[in-house]
């Protein structure tokens, strides 16, 4: 399990640099099944039915609220695609990886 899910997000209103691709790839290696696509990280979570999908969406909303860092979600019957990026800096921040790790922990 990643130590990232033990961290807390730090408010980001801009004024800091986005992670370099090398920094992002290093953090990505601590996650399960996430991919980096440009200035974002993405993962599609699969479930047995719509109820489980929505339970995950609600749990991810709780994580987002607690961390004050919100992903883009694409919800389907048995899947939820999650995309994180830090819009305020136009790229990836450690917050994206912290929240991704917390969502990975929901699957366990």
Image (tube, rainbow, N blue to C red):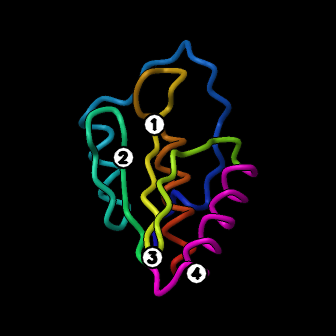
- Please tell me how crowded label 3 is: few (under 14), some (14-19), or many (20+) other residues with Cα within 10 Å: some
Among the 4 quarters of the image, the one containing residue 81: bottom left
Q: Residue at x 62, y 71 (%)?
A: 54
Return the disc, 2 or 3, that comes first in the chain's sequence.
2
Q: Which of marks 3 and 4 is nearer the N terminus?
A: 4
Residue 2 percent coordinates (x, y):
46, 65
The tag on residue 52 is 4
* Residue behind mark 2: 41
The residue indicated by pointer 1 is 85
Would residue 27 appear left or right of 55 to someone viewing this image?
left
Residue that label 3 marks: 78
Residue at left offset 51%, top offset 45%: 72
Q: Which quadrant of the structure image shows residue 92?
A: top left
Could you tell me which secondary element the residue under label 2 belongs to?
strand
- Asked if the residue at tag 4 contacts the one at tag 3, i.e. Cβ–Cβ closer than 8 Å, the answer is no
Label 1 or label 3, whichever comes before in sequence order = 3
Describe the element under mark 1 as helix, strand or loop.
Answer: loop
For the residue pair 71 and 1, the one nearer the viewer reads as 71
Q: Identify the secondary structure beneath mark 4.
A: helix
Q: Crowding at label 2, few (<14), some or many (≥20) Cα neighbours within 10 Å?
A: many
Residue numbers of the magenta segment: 47-66
Q: Where is residue 14 in the image (x, y as percent from the top left)?
A: 57, 17
């Amino acid at each position: 399990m990643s130590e990232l899910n033990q961290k807390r997000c730090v408010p980001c209103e801009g004024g800091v640099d986005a992670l370099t691709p090398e920094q992002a790839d290093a953090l990505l290696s601590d996650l399960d099944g996430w991919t980096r696509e440009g200035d974002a990280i993405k993962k599609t979570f699969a479930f047995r039915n719509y109820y489980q999908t929505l339970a995950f969406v609600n749990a991810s909303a709780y994580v987002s609220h607690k961390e004050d860092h919100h992903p883009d979600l694409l919800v389907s019957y048995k899947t939820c695609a999650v995309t994180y990026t830090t819009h305020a800096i136009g790229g990836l921040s450690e917050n994206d990886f912290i929240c991704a790790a917390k969502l990975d922990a929901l699957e366990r």
